[in-house]
Image: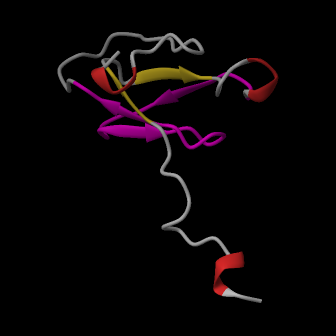
Amino acid sequence: MSAKSHPTADALAAPEVIKVRSHRVACDGVGGALGHPRVWLEMGDAAFVECPYCDRRFVAADAESHEDERLAPGVYEGAGGH
């Protein structure tokens, strides 16, 4: 079997990174049949949290803000922040 038939860590796409203002976020994947059960994630003292289902990484855009934030499919603003 050739080396090309086995994907490496470099060949895999990086998980999606979403900047958020809250240290508490909800994730349900892409929503609908392709999503996953909605889970609430808490960052605690960390600057990020990863979804255990889809590996999305939610990164705190501003450490001073601790407002509650709900992420609906397709509603976040991507890399520009949420």
Residue sitting nearer the eye, 4 or 52: 4
Q: Residue at x 32, y 41 (%)?
A: 46
Res 17 → quadrant? top left
Q: Is residue 16 above or below residue 71?
A: below
Q: Position of residue 18 (x, y in %)?
A: 40, 29
In the rendered view of the protein, which quadrant contains the C terminus?
top left
Residue 45 horizontal side relative to residue 25, left or right: left
In the rendered view of the protein, which quadrant contains the N terminus?
bottom right
Residue sitting nearer the eye, 75 or 37: 75
Q: Position of residue 52 (x, y in %)?
A: 61, 43
Q: Position of residue 20 (x, y in %)?
A: 35, 22
Give, as a single range, the part of the protein colored magenta. 36-61
Number of numbered discs visible in the structure rendering: 0
Q: Is residue 6 magenta?
A: no
Q: Is residue 52 magenta?
A: yes
Colour option used = secondary structure
Q: Is residue 55 above or below residue 6?
A: above
Res 48 → quadrant? top left
Res 2 → quadrant? bottom right
Q: Residue at x 52, y 38 (%)?
A: 56
Residue 27 horizontal side relative to residue 78, left or right: right
Q: Extreme bottom residue here?
A: 1
